[in-house]
């Protein structure tokens, strides 16, 4: 299920490093490529709790970054260039 209010993407940041995230709608997740951490989206609501985030291994990180690049998925807010 997609994020229930797409406007949330403009404001969502990683709760740990406060940086931007990739939004993978088809995987119901937000991903922080700097910390290799994935946040689930459950019933349209992002679960932005550090303790509930999934750490991904190097292979999964590579897959997610390549997917973002191949599908032209950008980090979710404009400040990403400065992070």
Image (cartoon, grey):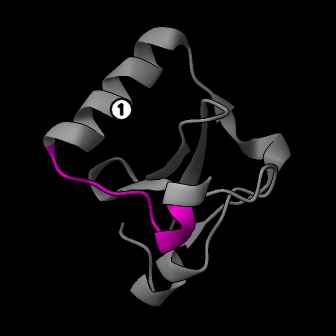
Q: Is residue 48 above or below residue 35?
A: below
Residue 80 at x, y = what percent? 52, 59
Residue 37 at x, y = what percent? 63, 36
Taking the view exactly as shown, the residue that stands out farthest to the front is 82
Which residues fall within the magenta stretch? Answer: 71-80
Q: Please name whichever residue, 17 or 54, is drawn nearer the observer in this view of the structure.
A: 17
Q: Residues within 10 Å of mark 1 (few under 14, many from 20)?
A: some
The image quadrant that residue 70 belongs to is: top left
Identify the residue under disc 1.
65
Asked if the stretch drawn in magenta spans residue 16, the answer is no
Residue at x 60% of width, y 29% of height: 36
Say whether residue 70 is visible: yes
Residue at x 78% of width, y 58% of height: 15
Give the secondary structure at mark 1.
Answer: helix
Residue at x 49% of width, y 76% of height: 9
In the image, 3: left or right of 74? right
Q: Is residue 49 above or below residue 58?
A: below
Q: Is residue 69 above or below residue 45?
A: above
Residue 6 at x, y = what percent? 40, 84
Q: Please name whichever residue, 53 or 74, is drawn nearer the observer in this view of the structure.
A: 74
Q: Please name whichever residue, 80 or 36, is drawn nearer the observer in this view of the structure.
A: 80
Residue at x 28% of width, y 42% of height: 68
Residue 42 at x, y = what percent? 54, 62
The image quadrant that residue 52 belongs to is: top right
Asked if the stretch drawn in magenta spans residue 78, the answer is yes
Say whether residue 44 is visible: no
In the image, 76: left or right of 52? left
The image quadrant that residue 20 belongs to is: bottom right
For the N terminus, the quadrant is: bottom left
Q: Main secondary structure of the magenta part?
A: loop
């Amino acid at each position: 299920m997609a994020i229930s209010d797409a406007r949330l993407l403009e404001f969502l940041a990683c709760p740990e490093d406060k940086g931007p995230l990739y939004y993978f709608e088809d995987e119901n997740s937000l991903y922080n490529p700097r910390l290799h951490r994935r946040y689930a989206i459950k019933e349209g609501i992002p679960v932005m709790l550090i303790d509930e985030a999934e750490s991904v291994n190097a292979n999964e990180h590579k897959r997610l970054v390549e997917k973002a690049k191949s599908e032209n998925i950008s980090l979710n807010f404009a400040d990403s260039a400065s992070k």
